[in-house]
Amino acid sequence: MTPIDRQTILITGATDGLGRAMAAQLAAQGATLVLHGRSKDKGEALVEELRAKTGNDRISYLLADFARLSDIHRLADEAGALDRLDVLVNNAGIGVELDRQESWDGHELTFQVDYLAAYVLAVRLAPLLVRSAPARIVNVSSAGQAPVNFDDVMLRRRWDGVQAYCQAKLAQVMLTVDLAAALEGTGVTVNALHPASYMPTKMVVGLFTPQSTVADGVRHTLRLVTDPSLDGVTGRYFDRSTEARASSQAYDSAARARLRSISEELTGVPFPYAA
């Protein structure tokens, strides 16, 4: 494993909650950070704050609104131009929405922000990660999982915010399983985790009663980012820091093939069947 102060780490959704707290710890450890968010002002303030607190000036910010596929692709272009990338943390997401919303591309918003963005970034940045190996992809999923409704992925006929969130989070685990297999032998590992239950973040407060701290989520997520004992461990789902079994659809090869086909069609990004 490359020493942390020589690693370049991209964290999506870094201006609030779990992503922000992870960025603070990694900045203090000397990592080169590429942080993502959808607010120019919040991003610039975050970079200034982290540089001042840690003395680490190797921190940059990339702007992208995941409600636009064009922004996701631009982020992949910009990150793909980096000299190296040791870790991609797909952390950005939205929670359980009260009303159905669509992205600028006409897709159900939760599916695009929580899953399609992770698909595009992981697949498009895989070649850079391979060149930088040993490298890691960490998908921040959830214990809240539901089978993808392939008959109505965009939930146009029957909207349910819990289904939208839970199927997108299971789709992340399905991507984890497939991409780990595709990248086997390259030195790039792909894992997913449920970081903590109901942390007091924007997507929880006001809807649910917090049960864990953000520090809990940071500890479990950073384990997948930095723990040398996980070198070579890939294609796994962790409930906090314990390897666990995801919802059964994650292990259904036919379901994963359907999801790959849908993902390719919606994003225009072919899945790397061979690394």
Image (cartoon, rainbow, N blue to C red):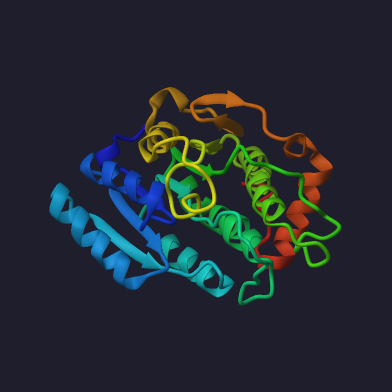
Residue positioned 62% across, 42% down in the render: 176
On the picture, is 29 further left or further right than 268?
Answer: left
Res 154 quadrant in image: bottom right
Q: Which quarter of the rendering shows the N terminus? A: top left
On the picture, is 121 further left or further right than 220?
Answer: right
Residue positioned 33% across, 35% down in the render: 2
Locate residue 259, reporting x and y percent. 75, 52
Can residue 2 be seen at all in this image of the molecule? yes
Locate residue 158, reporting x and y percent. 81, 62
Q: How many marks?
A: 0
Can residue 268 be seen at all in this image of the molecule? no
On the picture, is 30 further left or further right than 221?
Answer: left
Locate residue 72, reporting x and y percent. 52, 67
Q: Who is closer to the viewer here, 23 or 101?
A: 101
- Residue 239, compared with residue 34, is above or below; it is above
- Residue 231, compared with residue 124, is above or below; it is above
Q: Who is closer to the viewer here, 127 or 239?
A: 239
Res 199 quadrant in image: top left
Residue positioned 46% across, 51% down in the render: 205
Locate residue 224, reporting x and y percent. 45, 33
Residue positioned 82% across, 60% down in the render: 152
- The residue sitting at the right extreme is 151
